[in-house]
Amino acid sequence: MDTLTTLVGADYSEARQHEVRKKRMVMVDGSLTANANTVEGGSSARVMKGGYWGFASVPAMDQASADKVARKALDNADAMGGFGSRDPLDLPLDSYQGEHGFNGKPPLTQKECVGLLESLHGLTSKKYPELRSAMFMLQEESHAKRYATSNGSLGLNSINRATCYIILIAEDQHGQPVELMHAISGKGNLNDLNLNMASLEDELETLHQHLQAKRYAVPARGGEQTVVISPELAGMLAHEAMGHPCEADLVLGGSVTGNLVGKPVASELITMVDFAHSYNGEELMIPVYCDDEGTESRDVVMIENGIMKNFMTSRETAAKLGIPSSGNARAYTFNDEPLVRMRNTAILPGTSKLEDMIADVEDGYFLMKTGNGQADSTTEFMFGIDLAYEIKNGKLGNAVSDTTVSGTAINMLKTVDAVSDDMHWECNGYCGKKQPMVVSLGGPAIRARAHLGGQ
């Protein structure tokens, strides 16, 4: 982006050139069933005038196109003004300049990706011939965003992530299919992941052992139970059940968290943060140094020692709430407007050992994997549980049939009596909120009371 088009009459303006590249390859039982490489890019502009936003986009990235969409965005803001006058917003106008790319390993060629899939299939077929089916999927996704704003922000943001999915299917004792999935995800491209065959063999063996246990699964007892929630699931809980209600646009829309700042919403063992780009001195999987409005991204401590503290904001929502902008405004593609979105959301580690947390449970459940979940602005949630085990007298027992865990996150988090000292991060999924978004989730294991679905 060479220059930002000067727009006479605009109170504030921003421009973005955004390119998204994706690779996806799927092998099912030795047959390559999908092999896609896509590139999508374009220019967009957003203008604030008289209290109204105007937005426009075009699938081109030259300067003439950028100039055209800027003028169109101003026209759209003028058109919105026809609905009546508004008090102009006093937007926070802090700016940021910087270029943040990613220097990883050279990407795998198509031939190398196919070879990796074939090796995974061969290994699985040899070790586990009783499986009904095995599917492997490789995915890469990269975002390069150049931005400029009328208050001086200028630069480049880059996000690159890759995932290897392993899905195994067997028959249970009644002849019905049972399935488990494991995802290996990280920053960069597939070559930046640890996908050597020795490591993959260990991952396969662990997944296969869980699948074998699930073949003889027993139903969970319905009702409120003591549960130890794995780090993988705790990250999802943090994102869905408490993260979304702390997004400022949802707060302005009536989220229950809006009236809870300074009040207890969790056990004092719980601290939850949306990290901008780094944790413990290391860059995270979805590094956002500057958001798509040109605001420097800052960590947001949403819950500190059980007390509700802060919300994630954009320029507009920060102005309406009278708090600083945290740099959480993000758009998925060039033709999306920035919305308040999470980046790297996690519950922070505690001091307990996971094995001790399980050993102290006389009768309960260890919840390990989820395939889906939903929550709303009241913090009510429900997640499907794909892998869980009974805990009997401090030891893991039978695997549990697919079930659900549900409740109100605030009530559940208040029952937390142990948080493990380990930390798990992953970035294999998407967050849905009008548009998809790449995010990462993190967490330790937590022990709490929650409601399980039963027979």
Image: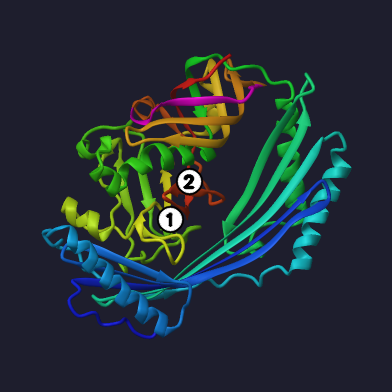
User: Tag 1: residue type?
Assistant: Tyr
Depth check: give the residue in front, 229 or 218: 218
Q: Which residue is depicted at the point 46% across and 47% down? A: 432
The residue under the point 79% across, 51% down is 120
Q: Distance between the residues labelled 2 and 1?
A: 11 Å
Disc 2 residue crowd, few under 14, some 14–19, many 20+, Cα 10 Å? many
Q: Is residue 324 left or right of residue 289?
A: left
Binning the other alpha carbons within 10 Å of mark 1 as few (below 14), some (14 to 19) or many (20 upward) gives few
The quarter of the image holding the N terminus is bottom left
Q: Let me know if residue 357 appears in the view.
A: yes
- Counting from the top left corner in percent of width and height, residue 158 is at 48, 69
- The amino acid at mark 2 is Gly
Q: In this view, does 267 lie above or below 193?
A: above
Camera-side residue of 316 and 337: 337
- Which label number is shown at residue 442? 2
Q: What stretch is highlighted in magenta?
A: 399-410
Provide residue 53's location: percent of width, then percent of height.
Answer: 25, 63
Describe residue 256's horizontal placement relative to residue 59 as left or right: left
Q: In this view, does 145 lie above or below 281?
A: below
Q: Earlier in the sequence, mark 2 or mark 1?
A: 1
Q: Is residue 148 visible?
A: no
Q: Residue 98: x and y, percent? A: 37, 76
